[in-house]
Image (cartoon, rainbow, N blue to C red):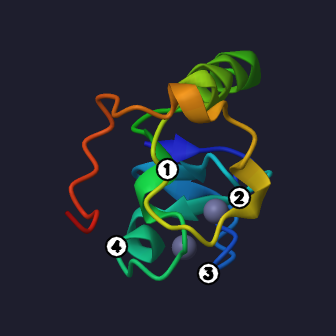
Amino acid sequence: MIHKDIMCNRCEMEEIAGNRYKCLLCDRYNMCQRCYSKEDHPHQECFLRLAYPLPQEEIQHLVETVQSVPSNKPSSSNPSQATSNPNNVRQQKTGIVDEHT
Ligand SMILES: [Zn+2]
Ligand SMILES: [Zn+2]
């Protein structure tokens, strides 16, 4: 599956082939499967995986849905998302297992 006009921000492939990975924290940041699998982006856990192209509005809607879910951020080095109400930061079904317990 080809994602037309979606460039991989990492290897600069002009049309992402296969799965497209969109970072939910970075604005307009996309990676191809191969770059994503290198796991060197700071927000690896916060990617939207798109197996086939979706209309921009759909994607925007998905991103907003995901971003509105209060979740424990895996890394504390993320000041841009520090706005959630501390009372709401209780564990959600985010599947984050990497906390110090
Ligand atoms: Zn790439
Ligand atoms: Zn990112």
Respond yes or no on whether mark 3 lies under 8 Å from ligand 1: yes
Q: Identify the mark nearer the N-term, 3 or 2.
A: 3
Marks 4/3: CA–CA distance: 12 Å
| Amino acid type shown at disc 3 | Cys
Q: What residue type is labelled 1?
A: Phe
In space, the residues marked 2 and 4 are separated at their CA atoms by 15 Å
Question: Is the residue at mark 2 in contact range of ligand 2, meaning its CB lies under 8 Å from it?
Answer: yes
- Depth check: give the residue in front, 75 or 46: 75
Q: Distance from label 2 to label 1 (Cα)?
A: 10 Å
Pointer 2 residue: 29
Can you identify the residue that label 1 sits on? 47
Q: Which mark is residue 4?
A: none
Q: Earlier in the sequence, mark 1 or mark 3?
A: 3
The structure residue drawn at horizontal position 56% and vertical position 67%, both measured from the top left corner, is: 76
Closer to the observer: label 3 or label 2? 2
Dot 2 crowding, Cα within 10 Å, few <14, some 14–19, many 20+? some
Q: Are marks 2 and 4 in contact (CB under 8 Å)?
A: no
Q: Where is residue 15 in the image (x, y as percent from the top left)?
A: 64, 57
Horizontal and vertical percent for residue 78?
Answer: 66, 64
Question: Could you tell me which secondary element the residue under label 4 belongs to?
Answer: loop
Instruction: Please report whichever mark, 4 or 3, sits nearer to the chain's N-terminal start.
Output: 3
Asked if the residue under mark 1 is in contact with the one under mark 2, i.e. CB atoms within 8 Å, the reply is no
Ligand 2 under 8 Å from disc 1 Cβ: yes
C-alpha distance separating marks 3 and 2: 12 Å
Whether residue 59 sits left or right of residue 1 in the image: it is right
Question: Which element carries disc 3, helix, strand or loop?
Answer: loop
Q: Which of marks 2 and 4 is nearer the N terminus?
A: 2
Amino acid at the residue labelled 2: Tyr
Q: Which mark is residue 11?
A: 3
